[in-house]
Image: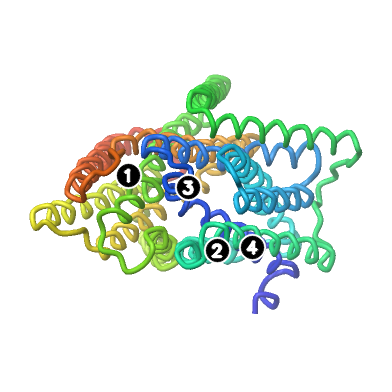
């Protein structure tokens, strides 16, 4: 059916990205538990390490895109990314000490940065003769992303529970081996190539190799050393802000106003992801420690991805319904609602934890699931809207760079998530009742933070819309 409706080669992109996401979500959903159980880090150290890993996985997407553009093209970058990911997950499978494990994580962040942005970019090239099929093609592609995410999150917890840590990381390595074979064979069968004329020579290949090694070393230092990580991401944040300010000042008229609106909304985006990523940080540990579970705590995160698949068509239908009646919500209005749903997701956990404290019982699993579903609803109000606003609010010649800045905001949000999660760090041998108090108080911080940004967004809707002017209402 996909072959009839979509250009030849589409299933190759779909399956490659699905397996890439499978591996990534196996690791993302279980990393906090591995750090605590196997490396024996404290809660605080775990949150810092996972925050740095999450941030680098997104930040390296910028550099992966640059390597593809300047040196090797999309197709070779995708194969290089799949190779690095397979190596990284294999190192995690057989890691004998802390440093080898951190090296594996560093390689995974670079591999993700090489594969993820470039496969999305190369996909657009198969629609050059049939551009009318592009929109539905990308919709199906993103369904593949979330099928992989659900599989990785859900199955990872059960594989770990029944077969152990070696097996769970081995499953991720096997997934990426399948991704590599799928793309390598499919690339030849369907003649999938980067249609841009990028000259390939040994010099460029060598430069790409050196750049990849440099990124791995930088990522290793960033994950291994908290001080270096803090310095690195502070510099990244300041440079991104300086780049935005420079472009605002060097443009005039409508372009300046729209770039200003983009800058404000990108800052809001970073703040959103700081709370969103708590599902892999403090909420996962709360689920493990104070919840009456019928499945592994990490497997519960699959409900967030499931929520995206369930709610996605409903929200798209809502936007179409509003557009037909000329009542479509503006970009900042949709952003503000994402914070409201983040806040509500933690409000549910606060109420349920308070009930557990009052009745000397454990948190019920159903409330974790409801919270994840609300996070999913909020994600759909900012993630696709944010990606679309890049081309809407920035000059075409800056689309690539500004997409990089928006992805950077997600990465910096991941780093901030690790800092924000410090409030949920618990002492060793804490009782369930003590833990419930700690998580309730932390979730109150996240809930209040999200509600504050929601109110701030509401106040900013009118000024931002004036900057955007004719683009949205």
The mark that comes first in sequence, 3 or 2, is 3
Say which label, 1 or 2, has the lower sequence index. 2
**Residue 322, which numbered label?**
none
Left or right, 89 with respect to 73, comes to: left
Q: Residue at x 29, y 59 (%)?
A: 368
CA gap between label 1 and label 2 equals 29 Å
**First-in-chain label (4 vs 1):** 4
Q: Which of 167 and 218 is in front in this view?
A: 167
User: CA separation, marks 3 and 2?
Assistant: 26 Å
Q: Distance between the residues labelled 4 and 1?
A: 37 Å
Name the disc covering residue 148, or none. Answer: 2
Question: Marks 3 and 1, how far apart in space?
Answer: 40 Å
The reply to whether callout 1 and callout 2 are in contact (CB within 8 Å) is: no
In this view, the mark in front (3 or 1): 3
SS at mark 3 in the image: loop
* Between discs 2 and 4, the one toward the N terminus: 2
Residue depth check, mark 3 versus mark 2: number of the one nearer the observer: 3
Query: The residue tagged with tag 2: helix, strand or loop?
Result: helix
Q: What element carries label 1?
A: helix
Query: Does residue 141 appear to the left or right of 268 in the view shown?
Result: right
Residue 283 lies, with reference to residue 225, above or below; the image says: below
Q: Which label's residue is closer to the chain start, 4 or 3?
A: 3
Tell me the SS state at disc 4: helix
Left or right relative to 16: residue 295: left
Q: Residue 36 location, x and y as percent?
A: 42, 45
Q: Name the residue under label 3.
A: 38
At 69% from the left edge and 57% from the top edge, which residue is drawn?
123
For label 2, the crowd category at 10 Å Cα-Cα, with few meaning under 14, some 14 to 19 and many 20 or more, is many
Q: Can residue 2 be seen in this view?
A: yes
Question: Which of the two residues, 421 or 388, is positioned nearer the viewer here?
Answer: 421
Query: Where residue 336 is drawn, which disc sits there?
Result: 1
């Amino acid at each position: 059916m996909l072959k009839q409706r979509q250009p030849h080669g589409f299933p190759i992109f779909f399956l490659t990205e699905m397996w890439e996401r499978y591996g990534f979500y196996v690791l993302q959903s279980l990393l906090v538990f591995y750090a605590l159980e196997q490396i024996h880090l404290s809660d605080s150290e775990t949150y810092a390490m996972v925050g740095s890993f999450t941030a680098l996985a997104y930040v390296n997407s910028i550099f992966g895109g640059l390597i593809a553009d300047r040196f090797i093209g999309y197709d070779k970058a995708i194969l290089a990314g799949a190779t690095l990911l397979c190596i990284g997950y294999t190192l995690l499978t057989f890691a004998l000490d802390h440093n080898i494990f951190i090296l594996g994580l560093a390689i995974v962040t670079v591999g993700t940065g090489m594969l993820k942005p470039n496969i999305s970019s190369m996909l657009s090239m198969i629609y050059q003769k049939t551009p009318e099929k592009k929109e539905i093609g990308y919709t199906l592609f993103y369904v593949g992303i979330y099928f992989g995410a659900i599989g990785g999150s859900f199955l990872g917890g059960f594989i770990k529970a029944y077969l152990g840590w070696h097996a769970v990381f081995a499953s991720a390595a096997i997934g990426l081996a399948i991704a590599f074979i799928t793309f390598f064979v499919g690339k030849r069968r369907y003649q999938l190539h980067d249609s841009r004329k990028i000259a390939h020579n040994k010099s460029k290949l060598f430069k790409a190799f050196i750049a990849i090694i440099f990124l791995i070393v930088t990522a290793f230092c960033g994950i291994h050393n908290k001080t270096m990580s803090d310095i690195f991401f502070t510099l990244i944040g300041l440079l991104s802000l300086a780049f935005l300010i420079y472009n605002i000042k060097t443009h005039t008229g409508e372009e300046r106003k729209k770039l200003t609106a983009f800058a404000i909304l990108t800052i809001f985006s970073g703040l959103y992801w700081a709370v969103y990523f708590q599902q892999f940080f403090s909420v996962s540990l709360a689920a493990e420690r104070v919840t009456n579970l019928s499945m592994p705590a990490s497997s519960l995160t699959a409900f967030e991805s499931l929520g995206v698949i369930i709610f996605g068509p409903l929200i798209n239908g809502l936007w179409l319904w509003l557009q037909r009646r000329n009542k479509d919500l503006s970009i900042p209005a949709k952003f503000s609602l994402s914070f409201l749903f983040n806040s509500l997701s933690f409000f549910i956990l606060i109420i349920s934890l308070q009930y557990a404290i009052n009745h000397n019982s454990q948190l019920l699993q159903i409330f974790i699931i409801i919270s994840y579903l609300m996070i999913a609803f909020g994600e759909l109000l900012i993630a696709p809207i944010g990606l679309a606003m890049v081309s809407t609010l920035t000059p075409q010649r800056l689309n690539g760079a500004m997409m990089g800045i928006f992805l950077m905001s997600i990465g910096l949000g991941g780093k901030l998530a690790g800092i924000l999660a410090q409030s949920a760090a618990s002492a060793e041998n804490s009782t369930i009742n003590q833990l419930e108090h700690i998580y309730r108080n932390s979730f109150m911080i996240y809930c209040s933070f999200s509600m504050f940004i929601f109110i701030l967004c509401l106040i900013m809707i009118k000024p931002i819309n004036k900057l955007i002017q004719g683009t949205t209402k």
